[in-house]
């Protein structure tokens, strides 16, 4: 998949070849592409991966693996010992099996361990901490910038917020060089999170729940990983927070129209009252949670259609100096075609 995207060159990767870097979450969607780019840039890449993680997509890349949990003190100490740069991308799965403590371990406890270990390395250069725009929750008066208030809505977002606030405070007090990136909704070839939405465009009618505008902000995984690499060496990024997303947000209805057009379909947007779906979601969660079963419908997924996520990404361009390569439309078309190639989506 890396051949489809930009390979870092002098413009995107100023980290000297042979430098030790550590990636957490390397087997995930975002971490996978980042890791490939770093190896291709000639860096000495180490990565932490759970024993259950699938390493096959990276088997042809020169990576030193440390198997264990990212919140295990011994694993982190060995993996981060000589790292000059840490890209902390790891995130807990958002599913019925994940508890608040699971989120806290992967997001907060891992951040603490990695940061303390980084301080022991006199040659440490930068801690790239990956947060989420989810820390802001619903945006009432957007567009929201990096200084917009925090209002996390679930355990995932709460612990992401805790981790970000901790590393920012720790870094300033202890002199740890860091940069925080808050990605918008990540998409692109290799991801499945938008697949259900894309499949809905094959029908004649595309449902939108409630009366909201359903504004969404996207970031293509190629652009996102480029921003990580640039932030690692940019003097202007030191101690800063950046929201990474496309220049403009996009309405879910427009996403549906672009995908439908790519598939050669025509759709009609239909508005449906949302309150029955919230009730159904709550019932499903109550029934499924004790059995650790993923509910077929849950409140967070329903709320997806009611909350606007409108952000100002000016700082990414003017301070970090990165202009996204992929427009919303180009990226959505590319992703839809990739789904078709995989046999997951039919024209």
Image (spheres, helix red, strand yellow):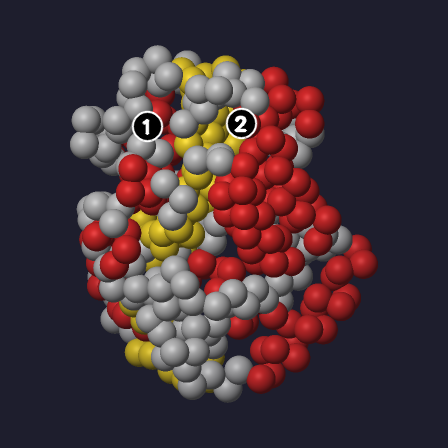
Q: Residue furthest right?
A: 290
Q: Nearer the viewer, mark 1 or mark 2?
A: 2
- The answer to whether one can see residue 56 in this image is no
Q: Residue at x 56, y 22 (%)?
A: 120
Say which of 6 and 1 sits in front: 6
Q: Position of residue 81 (x, y in %)?
A: 55, 18
Taking 157 as reference, is 14 above or below it?
above
Q: Residue at x 65, y 76 (%)?
A: 280
Say which of 334 and 185 sits in front: 185
Label 1 to label 2: alpha-carbon separation:
22 Å
Q: Position of residue 205 (x, y in %)?
A: 36, 76
Q: Position of residue 26 (x, y in %)?
A: 48, 31
Taking 144 as reference, is 104 above or below it?
above
Q: Work out which quarter of the rendered image holds the C terminus and state it.
A: bottom left
Q: Position of residue 108 (x, y in %)?
A: 62, 45
Q: Work out which quarter of the rendered image holds the N terminus and state it.
A: top left
Say which of 195 and 133 sits in front: 133
- The answer to whether one can see residue 237 in this image is yes
* Image-based side of 89 in relation to 95, left or right: left
Alpha-carbon neighbours of circle 1 within 10 Å: few (<14), some, or many (≥20)? Answer: many
Q: Answer with mark 1 or mark 2, whichever residue precedes in sequence.
A: 1
Say which of 254 and 130 sits in front: 130
Q: Which numbered circle lies on residue 118?
A: 2
In the picture of the structure, the residue carrying the numbered disc 1 is: 37
Q: Secondary structure at mark 2?
A: helix
* Image-based side of 232 in relation to 105, left or right: left
Q: Residue at x 56, y 64 (%)?
A: 152
* Image-based side of 89 in relation to 259, left or right: right
């Amino acid at each position: 998949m890396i051949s489809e995207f930009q390979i870092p060159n002098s413009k995107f990767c100023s980290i000297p070849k042979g430098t030790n870097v550590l990636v957490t979450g390397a087997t995930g969607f975002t971490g996978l592409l980042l890791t490939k780019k770093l190896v291709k840039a000639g860096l000495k890449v180490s990565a932490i991966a759970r024993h259950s993680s699938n390493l096959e997509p990276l088997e042809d890349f020169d990576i030193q693996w440390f198997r264990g949990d990212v919140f295990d003190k011994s694993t982190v100490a060995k993996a981060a010992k000589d790292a000059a740069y840490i890209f902390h991308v790891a995130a807990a799965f958002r599913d019925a099996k994940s508890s608040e403590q699971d989120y806290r371990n992967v997001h907060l406890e891992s951040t603490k361990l990695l940061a303390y270990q980084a301080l022991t390395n006199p040659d440490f250069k930068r801690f790239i901490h990956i947060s989420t725009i989810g820390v802001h929750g619903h945006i009432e008066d957007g567009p929201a910038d990096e200084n917009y208030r925090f209002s996390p809505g679930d355990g995932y977002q709460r612990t992401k917020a805790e981790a970000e606030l901790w590393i920012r405070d720790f870094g300033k007090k202890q002199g740890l060089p860091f940069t925080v990136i808050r990605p918008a909704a990540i998409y692109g070839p290799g991801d499945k999170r938008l697949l259900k939405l894309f499949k809905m465009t094959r029908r004649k009618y595309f449902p939108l729940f409630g009366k909201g505008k359903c504004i969404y902000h996207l970031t293509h995984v190629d652009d996102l990983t480029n921003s990580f690499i640039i932030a690692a060496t940019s003097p202007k990024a030191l101690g800063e927070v950046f929201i990474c997303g496309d220049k403009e947000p996009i309405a879910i209805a427009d996403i549906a129209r672009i995908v439908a057009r790519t598939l050669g379909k025509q759709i009609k947007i239909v508005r449906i009252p949302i309150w029955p779906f919230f009730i159904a979601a709550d019932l499903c969660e109550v029934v499924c949670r004790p059995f650790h079963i993923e509910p077929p419908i849950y409140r967070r997924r329903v709320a997806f259609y009611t909350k606007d996520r409108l952000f100002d990404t000016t700082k990414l361009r003017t301070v970090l100096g990165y202009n996204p390569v992929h427009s919303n439309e180009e990226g959505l078309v590319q992703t839809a075609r990739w789904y078709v190639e995989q046999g997951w989506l039919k024209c």
